[in-house]
Structures are given as structure tokens and as C-alpha cells.
Amino acid sequence: DSGVTQTPKHLITATGQRVTLRCSPRSGDLSVYWYQQSLDQGLQFLIQYYNGEERAKGNILERFSAQQFPDLHSELNLSSLELGDSALYFCASSVESVRNEQFFGPGTRLTVL
Amino acid sequence: AQKVTQAQTEISVVEKEDVTLDCVYETRDTTYYLFWYKQPPSGELVFLIRRNSFDEQNEISGRYSWNFQKSTSSFNFTITASQVVDSAVYFCALSGTGANSKLTFGKGITLSVRP
């Protein structure tokens, strides 16, 4: 158990809908990262938050947004869903010390029908 | 831009064989970190090992060992005496620091260990 929690574990929805994925980082970790894993794109970085502020952006679509709350949990919002958004979404957290490991949650498997 | 290449896509070995997973990386950062993660069939990503760019000492941890060579930008990972439970997808990843601390992953190597 990495200490990072993600809910829900599975999500099935229809095209055009909006969903929210939730992540709680490990105790003491200030950085939260979101990644998408799909068959065609592999594991891709979406966005990073550090202590409530957006720190880095990757290949995140404009239909997607995220935020980190004062208690450091984070939410990833996906809207106007398309079939191609079906993927495994991972959250990771890090304390960003010299060790720099990121510990991953179990992921949320999103299926868009 | 950072890039990680895992040229091997699938490897199949018989239990107790040693297996080496190759990883080549590209980065312009002077300080960076290299990682290996394991993704078993259950789907979670498990952190295995980390190496800093300023420490080329190679180590062994149990059945795992790694060979980091800056001169060839390679970070290879070896499992000694493989076991069926080692069957998984293995990802090599690279990160910088601070605002560049995101992980850049390779495409992964599917390792199958047969009894």
C-alpha cells in the first residue's frame, strides 16, 4: 500500500458527461501529480500541483482541469467526455526531497461508452 | 525535452533465469533522477528503485540490481533468479527537479516468467 488513495476505482459513463476523480496524497507529501495511461499513448503526465498551486502542465486537454485543496487532496475534472478519454488515471504524490520518488495510487479506470 | 526509450517490448524467461531490462534516456538537465516502476496485472504502479544523476554507483537490493552509466545514458535493471511473481510490465522513468519533477516514462517492457 503506497499510502495514496484514489476514488472511485472504476467509473463508467457516457460520452458528453463530466466526472470528477479524487486523490488523497500520502501524509506529508505536498506535490500531487496526475497521469493518464492509455493503450495508444502509454503513461503520460497531465498536471502537477504543489501545496495548492499549479506547478507544471503536461499533455492535458482543455476539457480537463484539476485543483488541489488546502487539505492537499486533489481532484481531476474531466468534461465533455469522449470515447478516447477511456483510460487508467493515476495520481501520485511526492515530498520532493532529494529522493524525489513518486508514489502512485491504485488508479481510477474510466470507461466512456 | 526528456525522453525514455525501452527498446525491448516483451521478454519471456523461465523461472530462475536472470533477466536484464534495458533503458536509455535523454535529458538536458544536469540533475535528474531515474526510476524503475513495476505494474503487475492488478494494475497498480509500484516503485522499485531510484538513482540520482550525480551518483553512478551501482547497487544490488535483494534480487534486483541496476547499472547506471551516464556515458551511454543507460539505466539497466536486472532481476536475478526470476520468479513467476515478477511477471509484470516494467517502466523506466526520468524526472528533473522542482517544476520539472514530472515523470517521463518509457513504453514499458512486458516480462513473462514461466514456471
Image (spheres, coloured by chain):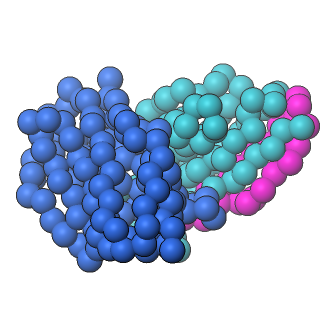
User: Toward the viewer: A57 or A14?
Assistant: A14
User: Toward the viewer: A56 or B102?
Assistant: B102
Dominant secondary structure (helix, strand or loop) of the stretch shown in magenta? strand
Q: How many marks overall?
A: 0
Q: Residue furthest bottom?
A: B62
Could you say which chain is coloured blue in the image? B
Q: Which residues are magenta?
A: A4-23
Above or below for A26 versus A37:
below
Q: Residue at x 51, y 68 (%)?
A: B114
Can residue B6 be seen in the rendering of this structure? Answer: yes
The answer to whether A32 appears left or right of A24 in the picture is left
Where in the figure is residue A67, as x and y percent of width and height? 60, 42
Chain A's colour? cyan
Where the C terminus of chain A falls, by quadrant? top right
Where in the figure is residue B51, as x and y percent of width and height? 21, 54
Above or below for A55 versus A75:
above
Q: Residue at x 55, y 37 (%)?
A: A42
User: Toward the viewer: A68 or A14?
Assistant: A14
